[in-house]
Image (cartoon, helix red, strand yellow):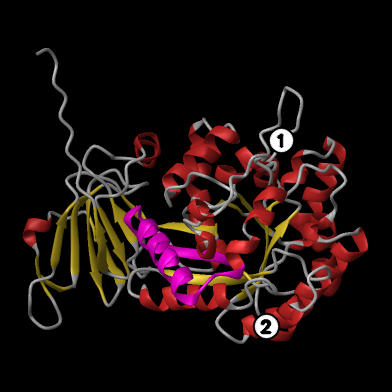
Amino acid sequence: MTLETDLVVRNAAVAGRDDPVTITVADDRIVSIIVDDPAEDEWTTSDDGDPTMIDADGGLVAGGFVDPHVHLDKAYVAPDLPPNESGTLAEAIASIHERKADYTLEDVRDRAIRAIEAHARNGCTRIRTHVDVDTIGGLTPLEGVVAAREACGELADVEIVAFPQEGIGQDEGTADLLERALESGADLIGGMPDNERTDADRRAHVDICLDLAERYDVGVDMHVDETDDPAARSLEYLAAEVIDRGFDRSVTAGHTCALAAYDDAHAARVIDLVAEAGLSAITNPPTNLVLQGRHDAHPKRRGITRVDELVEAGVTVAAGQDCLLDGFYPYGRASMLETALLTAHAAQLTTATERRFAWAFVAGNAASILEVEHGIESGNPATFNVFSSDVESRHEALRRGRPPRRVIHEGAVVAENEFESTVRRGR
């Protein structure tokens, strides 16, 4: 039998299937997943040429990773900043002001391209980035990331969230800039109500963001209660307002660290409200593990949200890299495997079921939040990763932490990684 295809992946281990399979791709989508002996088939491309052939050699093939929360405009800016001596969120925000005022389009673009390429090498070609929109940097961060998105269009899909990190009420002029951002390349409206002076101002911040989302018919992805303060109530207000408005666009709450500081009874009420409102949640352990809980006496809180209780309530939960070598986080490899592993440690995800959650947080769940098709299924976009032969399962991929051997985005090989390990005993 002759099959028309652009890409063939043979001897692939796919979760949920007992035998190795052959995956065929045409027109950027998965055409078939067959268990038959591939030696019995012949393949040709639409122009009668030979398709790209990849022998997975028994290695795992899985849907590509998704980073649902990162800041490309700030990536790799740490060497230009004063050190964050307190290690706190407040100092991190303040430390970047002078550097942000000096941003150029080229500067932001080049750093964002570097971050997108790093994601792709690590098997992540779908990215949602928050980009600062405020009176300090104006629209330069947005313009730089839009330029990077265009430059990397064949490498990755990038969604942009207009993010008022400096507040709206206390940064006069930001509301107008947010509108201009939505007219100039931003895909969603963000928010950071905790960077306002009063509870009334925080509620007004949420209202402005939802108003803009309704006016421009876009989704919402907001930084919510990224604080240790047990009195923080932005998440509760956001969920209630979404319900009261009958808001029918996607709404995602990022961080929600204060949820871990609430007493259990109040936390349960808020989580029920979040589930009723249909909010999604994104936890960001790489950054929040080091920023939150710094001033706790021992025992210190982990600083991340109540991942297990949100999952149990039926909330779609994902995990993001958040920061890459910036004033907030001095590490970061643009690796969703590392992000998943950090989440697994912080949220104590060790059973077989829990490990599947850790994987989903940077794969299927994250794709659901970005509203993109995901997974090794016929008809799905051909965006997937081919791991080395010694990685036969998602658990092994998490445990070993190595990037995929081949990264496929929309039917094309966009990154390749080779590994060679030699151990010598004796002299």
| Picture coordinates of residue 42, whole percent (x, y) | 7, 67
Nearest the eye: 231 or 370: 231
Quick check: is 384 in the magenta stretch?
no
Q: Quadrant of residue 152?
A: bottom left
| Picture coordinates of residue 115, whole percent (x, y) | 42, 60
The extreme top residue here reads 426
Q: Quadrant of residue 243?
A: bottom right
Quick check: is 118 in the magenta stretch?
yes
Nearest the eye: 377 or 98: 98
Task: Using the image, determine if residue 115 lies above or below residue 169.
Answer: above
Q: Residue at x 44, y 74 (%)?
A: 106
Q: Amino acid at mark 1?
A: Gly
Residue 131 in view of the camera: no
Q: Main secondary structure of the magenta part?
A: helix
**Magenta stretch in the rendered image:** 101-130
Name the side, left or right, on which 96 lies relative to 145.
right
Name the side, left or right, on which 224 lies relative to 156.
right
Q: Residue at x 27, y 78 (%)?
A: 27
Figure quadrant of the C terminus: top left
Q: Which mark is residue 293?
A: 1
> Is label 2 or label 1 in front?
1
Q: Residues within 10 Å of mark 1 (few under 14, many from 20)?
A: many
Residue tagged 2:
217
Task: Using the image, determine if residue 164 lies above or below residue 407.
Answer: below
Q: Residue at x 85, y 53 (%)?
A: 233
Q: Secondary structure at mark 1?
A: loop
Q: Amino acid at mark 2?
A: Asp
Q: Residue at x 55, y 82 (%)?
A: 185
The disc, 2 or 1, on the residue closer to the chain's N-terminal end is: 2
Figure quadrant of the N terminus: bottom left
